[in-house]
Each structure stands twice: as C-alpha cells, then as structure tokens.
Amino acid sequence: MTIALEIISPEKLLLTRDVDMVVIPGTDGDIGVLPGHSKLITGLRGGLVDIYEKGAISGRYFVSGGFAEVTESRCAVLADAIIPQEELDAGVAQAAVAEAKAAYDAVDIQDQDAYRNASDRLISAQAMLDSVTPHRGDAV
Amino acid sequence: MPSLKTLRGRINSVKSTRKITSAMKMVAAAKLRRAQAQAEAARPYAVRMGEMLAALAASEGDNPNASPLLVGNGKSQVHLLLAVTADRGLAGAFNGNISKAIRAEVKALEAQGKTVKIFALGRKGNDSLRRDLKDQIVNTRNFVGKKTIGFAEAEAVAEELVRGFKAGEYDVVSMVFNRFQNIMVQRVTEQALIPAVKPTANDNLRSENGALVEHNYEVEPDDGSLLDRLLPRNLAVQIYSALLENSAGFYASQMTAMDSATRNAGDMIKKLSLSYNRARQANITKELIEIISGAEAV
C-alpha cells in the first residue's frame, strides 16, 4: 500500500510520488501519514517533510509553512517555500533567523495579525536553521 | 500623383515596419508559451487550495463570527476595484477593454450611491484610468522590468488588500482581469475577492467527479484559525492566477495584434507597389510618346 504524495508550491507542482509513509510538520506537532489515514486538513509550521520508502527516509524537504490536505489515498502538501534538505545552507538560515528576530522584536504586540505573522516567521526561520543538521529520524 | 521617389520611400518605410511587427509577433509567441506554462504550473496549488477552502468555508459560512474575509464586514458602501492590466501596450484592445469595464462598473456602482476606489495593477491601466478617474485611484503597482511574475508579488498585493480591508478603507473588493480563453479570445471577467466567493459559485471548488466537496475532515488546529490563515493565502493565489492569466492573455493579444499588423503592412506594400509600377509605366509611355512624336516631326 502506498499513498500519493504531492508537494506543491504556489508556483509549481514540485513532486508527486507514491510513497510508503510521509511525516509532515503540523502546527500542533508532527503527523505521520500512512495510507488509509483519516481525512485531515492541517496547517503546517516550518519544518521537514520526511518521505519514507521501504523503511528508510528517501527524501526530506524543508517547508517554511503552509497547509496539508490528507485523504485515505492522498497527501497534498501546500507549502510556501520548499527546499530539499541537502540544499539548505546554514549561513542563509542564520541570516533568515536574524532578520525574523529583528522583525519580531519590532512588531507591535497589540496588532494580533502582525504579531502572529512575525512569530510564525521566526519559528519557521529557526526550524530552517535546525533542519540544516537534523537529528530526528536519522536512524530508522 | 506622388512622385516615384516618395512612393519608393513609403514602400521602404512600410517594409521596415513589417519587419518590426513580424519580429514582435514571434517574440510574443515565444513569451506566450512560457506564460502559459507558468499558468499551467500554478494550477495544482490553486485547485487543492480551493478544495480545502470549500470544505472549511461550507462549515464556517453560516457562523456569524466567521472571518470577515469570508463573510464580509456587514457593509457594502465602499467598493474597491482591482484593475489588472499589462504593463505594456501594442496588444490591440487588451488593456482598453479592462479600462472600459472599470469605467462601466464605476458608473454602475456610483448610480447605486456607493463609493468606488480603484487599485490599478499594471502600468497601462493606471495610465488610462488616471485620465478621468484620478481621484478614485487609491493605489497602484506595476511590474515593469520584471521578467516573470513571482508569487511573492501577488502576496504583497494580497497583504495590502487585507490591510486596507481590516483598516476599514473599503468593504467589498473585486477584481477585473482578462481571463485567457484561447489565443484569440480573452474575456474580461469580474471576480469577487472579499467577501470570498461562495463555494458553489466556483468550479475550482469541486472535486474530480463534479460533486461539491463535503466537509468530513478532521481539522488542526481548528476551522476558524485555519481559515484565518487560509483566506489571505487564497487571496494571494487568486491574484497570482489572475496575474498569470493576464500575462498569458497579453502576449496572446499582442501576438494577434502584431499578426494582423504584419498582414496589413503586406497589403499596404502591395497597393503601394501597384501605384509605383503604374507611375513608372506612365512615365515610360510618356517618354515613348515624346520620342515618337519628335521623330515624326523631323
């Protein structure tokens, strides 16, 4: 049994493949999606999408946030920015964290939307930095 | 009767015009292919997003506390029209059609006593609308010098719209753009952005078998807060796809316009050559008559 994974950015369909399992970074925690998963719509936080085939990770992509739609036979990841994990760069990630931190510090806490955006951005940038050298799920 | 020299000059100038228009036609054709590919590539995201939104909006639509982006803020006094045009001309009636539709819409809304504001997206629309609707244009943006339109640009426009809406600058937002139907036809379309279109009105929001998607999803974190994130995103997606349709339509329209300009130049050259040859022949005949009558006189 496989599940059809689609990773889509606003600009193009990045990847569509039948995989055994995929782990997505949901807003409330990571979600492992196997074939036959109940129907689910979730927001995504910044983090890694791990693709499992034959018991091992066969691909990891960093997403900066977005949404995912899961049905019994399909998992569609709608992400804002998608970068293959091996192409992540610590320097770029650090710059992003610094920038997001500055924006976060400058934001007006009373302005709920701006505050939420700034904190989402900081979390996502931090996740990007953490994903450069991932430590979870390495030994499967 | 113009002289042979002026005729020759005109033929040459029309010939160089034809060279330019036929080159522009070929360039437009190449760019059209790229723009179409880009529009095609952006479709899966829009389709999936539409499905999710339909599922959530169906359950949230009757909730009086639902996000104002979805159900509106209860007023409809101030309308914002987003006029999407190209940044360049020489494309037949492409930009003119949008301006015309905007003017008609402004007149219709003002007749109902509404206030109308305009956001001109694209240089040509701004140039043309500024002439008589200068006071209504509240914002303008163009992409002059950008090779392709990225999602980031659409997102910036969407953010600006949401900001203005939340600040109470307008109550209703709709967008007028050229929908790309085929190379010959671009249809002027008006699409409501805020409040968001009801799911039933949009084909994008239907699943593969044509049935309206029913909401039996688990939702994380919850319907309301997910919608709060999804709606601005969806706005950006709609603007992005309109911009892509606009750019594909522009090149298609430019290609058609340049094709007929090339053909007209060809016709013009034929006509001018005919009168050039006639004038030349008349000259020769006249000279012959002069020689013959001169010889006869001897």
Image: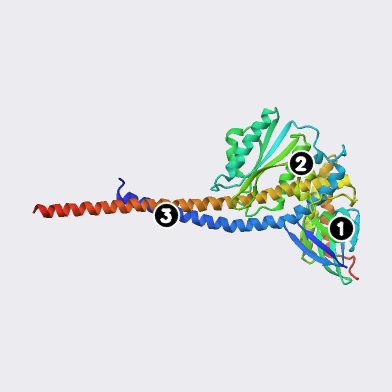
Quick one: SS at disc 3? Answer: helix
Q: Where is residue A121 in the image (x, y as percent from the top left)?
A: 81, 51
* Residue found 68% across the figure and 34% down from its top: B117
Count residues near mark 1 (Cα–Cα under 10 Å), then give few for <14, some for 14-19, many for 20+: some
Q: Where is residue B84 in the image (x, y as percent from the top left)?
A: 65, 44
State whether residue B55 appears in this view.
Answer: yes
- Indicate how the structure is coloured in the image: rainbow
Query: On what subunit does the disc labeled 2 rest?
Result: B
Left or right side of A11 for B29: left
Q: Residue B289 carries which label?
A: none
Q: What type is the residue that disc 2 sits on?
A: Val
Which residue is at the far bottom?
A54
Say which residue label 2 marks: B162
Q: Between residues B176 and A89, which one lies in front from this camera angle?
A: B176
Q: Between residues B66 and A109, which one lies in front from this camera angle?
A: B66
Query: On what subunit does the disc labeled 3 rest?
Result: B
The answer to whether marks 1 and 2 sit on the same chain is no
- Which of the image's four quarters has the N terminus of chain B? top left
The answer to whether marks 3 and 1 sit on the same chain is no
Quick one: SS at disc 2? Answer: helix
Which of labels 1 and 2 is toward the front? 1
* Residue found 62% across the figure and 45% down from its top: B85
Query: On what subunit does the disc labeled 1 rest?
Result: A
* Quarter occupied by residue B266: bottom left
Label 1 to label 2: alpha-carbon separation: 31 Å
Q: Position of residue B89 (x, y in %)?
A: 55, 47
Q: Where is residue B159 in the image (x, y as percent from the top left)?
A: 75, 44
* Residue found 56% across the figure and 51% down from its top: B254
Count residues near mark 2 (Cα–Cα under 10 Å), then give few for <14, some for 14-19, many for 20+: some
Q: Which mark is residue A71?
A: 1
Say which residue label 3 marks: B15
Q: What type is the residue that disc 3 sits on?
A: Lys
